[in-house]
Image (cartoon, rainbow, N blue to C red):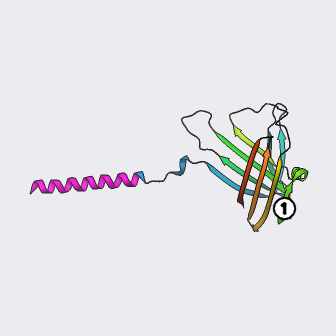
């Protein structure tokens, strides 16, 4: 009788241990995922900066009269690896009175499209990279705080970016 009770306790303990292991192994941890955000800012302006020693351009959002759109990618940062951090943005601006737009060719430059990677890296001046973006950006307002944006652009001669997403007011 004592052996039978002991066996039951052991079975319960094993079942509890197995159940706990299943629950722990099924836990979805999104903390080590890349992150993508699609947003826009109203009453803003996009300022493009650059450095003499680099072909890279930087878009800075300031107060203004336009809408500034921003795609942002933040790569998962592996804590055990030094200097592996990486992010990138694509920014551009449009007139805040528009409800629909499409820009390509030379008119693309009027909305100041800029792609900027952020990393522990250097982008030295290079004539073949210091070129205007080529492609198309289009969008349509789908609500008071949401736009459907399509981007198909090549930056710096060889950085192709294709995005088809909803951008939300930030």
Number of numbered discs overlaid on the protein picture: 1
Q: Farthest residue toward the right?
A: 106
Q: Is residue 5 left or right of residue 73?
A: left
Within 10 angstroms of label 1, few (less than 14), some, or many (20 or more) residues? few
Residue visible at 82% across and 32% down? 126
Q: Which residue is mark 1?
A: 101
Look at the image and say whether residue 22 sits in the magenta stretch.
yes
Q: Is residue 61 left or right of residue 16?
A: right
Task: State the image coordinates of residue 157 (x, y, percent, origin top left).
Answer: 81, 40
**In which quarter of the view is residue 104 placed?**
bottom right
Characterize the magenta stretch by its predominant secondary structure: helix
Look at the image and say whether residue 76 sits in the magenta stretch.
no
Q: Is residue 52 above or below residue 58?
A: above
- Looking at this view, is 169 or 62 the one in front? 169
Q: Is residue 26 left or right of residue 102?
A: left
Q: Which residues are magenta?
A: 1-24
Q: Farthest residue toward the bottom?
A: 143
């Amino acid at each position: 009788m004592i052996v039978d009770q002991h066996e039951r306790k052991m079975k319960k303990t094993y079942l509890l241990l197995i159940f706990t292991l299943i629950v722990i192994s099924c836990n979805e941890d999104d903390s080590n995922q890349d992150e993508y955000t699609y947003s826009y800012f109203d009453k803003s302006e996009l300022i493009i900066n650059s450095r003499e020693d680099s072909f890279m351009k930087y878009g800075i959002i300031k107060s203004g009269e336009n809408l500034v759109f921003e795609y942002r990618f933040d790569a998962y940062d592996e804590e055990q690896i030094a200097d592996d951090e990486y992010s990138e943005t694509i920014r551009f601006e449009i007139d805040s009175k528009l409800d629909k737009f499409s820009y390509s060719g030379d008119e693309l430059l009027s909305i100041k499209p800029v792609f900027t990677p952020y990393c522990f890296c250097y982008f030295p001046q290079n004539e073949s990279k210091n070129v205007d973006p080529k492609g198309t950006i289009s969008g349509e307002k789908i609500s008071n705080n949401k736009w459907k944006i399509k981007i198909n652009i090549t930056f710096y001669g060889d950085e192709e970016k294709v995005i088809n997403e909803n951008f939300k007011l930030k």
